[in-house]
Image: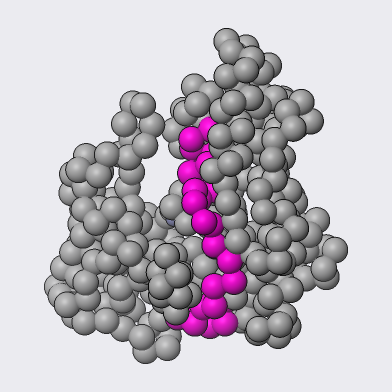
Amino acid sequence: MSQIAAHAPYGGVVPEIAARAHVEIVDGLIARAMANAGVKPAALDGIAAAAGPGLIGGVLVGLMSGKGMALATGKPFVAVNHLEAHALVARLAGRLAFPYLLLLASGGHTQILAVKGVGDYLRLGATMDDAIGEAFDKTAKLLGLPYPGGPAVEAAAKDGDPARFALPRPLIGRPNADFSLSGLKTATRLAAQAIAPLRARDVADLCASFQAAIVDVIEDRLRVGLRLFRERVGAAEGVVVAGGVAANGAIREAMARFCAQVGLPLVAPPPRLCTDNGAMIAWAGLERLRLGLTDDLAAPARPRWPLDPKAERALNNKA
Ligand code: KG4
Ligand code: ZN
């Protein structure tokens, strides 16, 4: 079960409204999914539910619904890490072997990881401030575009001039694979303020310039990420882009160019499997179930749940 977002009119998600929206629609949603698939509960191999990380109210509703179904049917239960689901769904789309290099870019996370196996991740880089999706969302809000910002910025950028505004490419050339996006966000705001009031052409050019900066940053960070991957893990089977931001056409094209240059296959799941969805949770559940990695019904909901806990601890100790 994926998260269901409740959007405030000014953009963003209101946690309490989101949690209540989950309660109201989750039963009907499960019934509809089962009916569409033509499957009865008895025919299921197991029940998987996202157990985090994320806004805890929504996570709890999905998790408890999954546990309830597991209890009622006697089927094995799998508590899925939402980030692992983004990381593994490429294998549903593309039959990809481990290990692979992953750019995971969503509204709350931006990381470059080595995916060595189910439950086995090495973090090679991460954002030091905003996530890429968050930068898209904030840029959209600044320019008066709707939430979620990614698709709106991408659509506006199509008619824009990516060279009109010389926006920064933070951390390009650095030897680590980290990201920093708050400077780019501020530079975009200052560029917009300098020419306000904005006409449609200005918004399109700002979006195109912003997106071009993001694309350049991703390409550079990925190049370093692949170098680190080869040093620490060995040869990669492929490159995967996942998370909501992976739905972006310009980012997918840039990644395809990068992969052609380095001679690795790119697996970019279809956009509807990139933004949050239930199929990716089911797929991660299946991968874990195959390995006998089931959970008992005491599995907790987790607001934070890093894929590479060692890297997370190292970062916290530094801070
Ligand atoms: O993975 P996801 O659906 O939810 C989270 O787990 O966060 O990612 C949502 C994020 C949002 O920030 C949204 O603006 C961004 O993904 N996104 C995009 C596009 N579609 C969604 N960003 C850039 N271009 C897109 N086409
Ligand atoms: Zn997500």
Magenta segment: does it hold 256?
no
Q: Position of residue 200 (x, y in %)?
A: 63, 15
Q: Give the range drawn in magenta.
A: 115-139
Point out the image quarter for the C terminus: bottom left
**Residue at coordinates 32% horizontally, 47% vertically from top-left?**
4
Classify residue 203 by image quadrant: top right
Q: In this view, does 22 lie above or below 136?
A: below
Residue shown at 58% from the left, 41% from the top? 183
The residue sitting at 42% across, 88% down in the picture is: 291
Q: Position of residue 213 (x, y in %)?
A: 70, 42
Q: Decide which of 81, 93 is in the foreground and name it.
A: 81
* Residue 238, position as x, y percentages in the image: 70, 72
Residue 20 is drawn in which quadrant? Answer: top left
Task: Give the x, y percent position of residue 159.
Answer: 72, 25
Residue 134 shown in magenta? yes
Camera-nearest residue between 120 and 195: 195
Quadrant of the image containing the N terminus: bottom left
Residue 90 against residue 5 in the figure, above or below? below
Q: Judge whether residue 103 can be spotted in this image.
A: no
Q: In screen coordinates, is 196 left or right of 31?
A: right
Direction from residue 296 to residue 308 in the image, left or right: right
Q: Which colour scheme is used?
A: one colour
Observer able to see residue 293: yes
